[in-house]
Amino acid sequence: MSKEILTTQDLHLYYGDKEALKGINLNFDAKGITALIGPSGCGKSTYLRTLNRMNDLIPNVTITGTIKFKGQDLYAPSADTVQIRKEIGMVFQQPNPFPFSIYDNVIYGLRIAGEKDKEKLDAVVEKSLRQAAVWDEVKDHLHESALALSGGQQQRVCIARVLAVSPEIILLDEPTSALDPVSSSQIETTLLNLRHDYTVITVTHNLQQASRIADRTAFFMNGELVEVDQTKNIFMNPAEKQTEDYISGRFG
Amino acid sequence: MMNPKTQNKVAIGTLYGVAGLVVLILLALLGYILVSGLPQLSWHFLTAPAKAFLKGGGVGVQLYNSFYLLILAMLISFPIALGAAIYLYEYAKDNWVTTTIRTAIEILSSLPSVVVGLFGFLFFVVKLRLGFSILSGAFALTFFNLPLLTRSIEDSLRTIDTTQREGGLALGLSRWETVTRVILPAAVPSILTGVILSAGRVFGEAAALIYTAGQSAPALDFTDWNPFNISSPLNPMRPAETLAVHIWKINSEGIMPDAKAISSGSSAVLVLAILLFNFAARYLGKRLYKRLTSA
């Protein structure tokens, strides 16, 4: 059996007439962290958002090609977006906790799914917040509003909220770009904790971040995937000239 | 030619002047109504029924009618407005259908209330044979209130950031779950404020009610709560003059000797009630928002 959990084949995406993704072929193995890098507007966020069908929310988007999650076509007419997003969770650029307590934020997905067992919910809250490396900071005020937390704590609560639904893949769209360096490094620690249990795919503008945390790095430019390889190869010994120019800061 | 600095000063001075004028007019108006009306107020005035020819009548029945009508109108219009606003903002695509609906709402909200009243008279009172009744009045007020309330709820939904919707959907919630379990709770304080403010407008409305809820206030028996009895306060089929209509009527055809005093007193009650609605809206909205959002 192949280890590949998510595969994309010849993926094109159009905003109206404008082609934003020009035939992406990219596969992901189960577990580990993959970083998507590239200059602004290169299509890396757009690509990320096709993986759990968040682009469905934008009018006028056309997608061709195939994305398969464990062999199932995500864009098949019978595909259930609600189920897909339970298995492929997403964390956004701006921390977006709901205006409820920390506790309620974390269990929201489960509670709406009908879970009522208080002990089980308590356990999930603790486990998720521990995995997101924010438990020690919030354990004494679980029932206070999540909006009272710092940006970095909010972002980790948002990660815990996704973990609580027990997805297999976690997509992160520039999760640290709105945060200060200290909070960013805490998020990085969190992600490193997760790489053994989850398939993590993160978009980042921060090359150092990619080199610190990612097992694999994919370089996007102008809607195309230029190169994907082990992170150290991309940074030390890239195959393509464009990658080398970008890594060394000659443009972008 | 003035230099930019003087120009700036003149502009700011003018703006202050204009703003001051608005506040002054408002204060003068409020002051006049309260100064001439407050002395008339007493427990007797607020609870006694009106008298047609004699001195010493009150506005008890009218005051009760105003509240009853307000509650009925809100019960009818709020669910419809909520549904319409959720559809328009959360579900509907931007196309000619929604544009048409929005334009219709705009037009409906700018209809003069006396036109709404006449329509209510022809349709509910005459055609549907509801007669001059609380129910006719409540329907007319619904027409008057619906567009305003829909717009205000839609605005409340608009203040909730898109990231919240994405957050809900990305957790594997359906669209409906996201709306009802994430967006609506977050929007409650602002929706509540909108509801109370529109309640203030409904409470003071006269023209839409003159031809629908009627201009007479039969005496009520406040010990009879069977809605099918004609003298029961709960009966929705009885004619019911409200406070605002009462003021209009006294001033146009009142023949009781203390008409002027009653009109002043009623105006003061009306203004106080509406002020109360406004302050309650601010207070509750702020409090709820605080409770929901901060530690």
Image: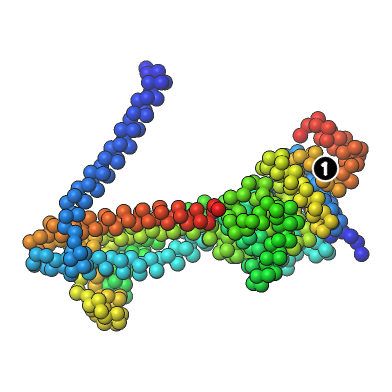
Write the residue at 44% across / 59% down. Answer: B192
Write the residue at 38% across / 58% down. Answer: B196
Image position, residue B261 (x, y; %)? 13, 57
Residue B13 can be seen in this image: yes
Image position, residue B40 (x, y; %)? 16, 57
How did the renderer colour the structure? rainbow
Residue B111 can be seen in this image: no
The relative height of residue A132 versus residue B77 in the rendered view (above or below) is above
Write the residue at 35% across / 67% down. Answer: B71
Q: Amino acid at mark 1?
A: Arg
Write the residue at 62% across / 49% down. Answer: A149
For mark 1, give the secondary structure: helix
Image position, residue A148 (x, y; %)? 58, 50
The relative height of residue A168 versus residue B14 in the rendered view (above or below) is below
Of A86 and A145, nearer the camera is A145
Q: Chain of mark 1?
A: A
Left or right placement of residue B283 versus residue A204 in this view: left
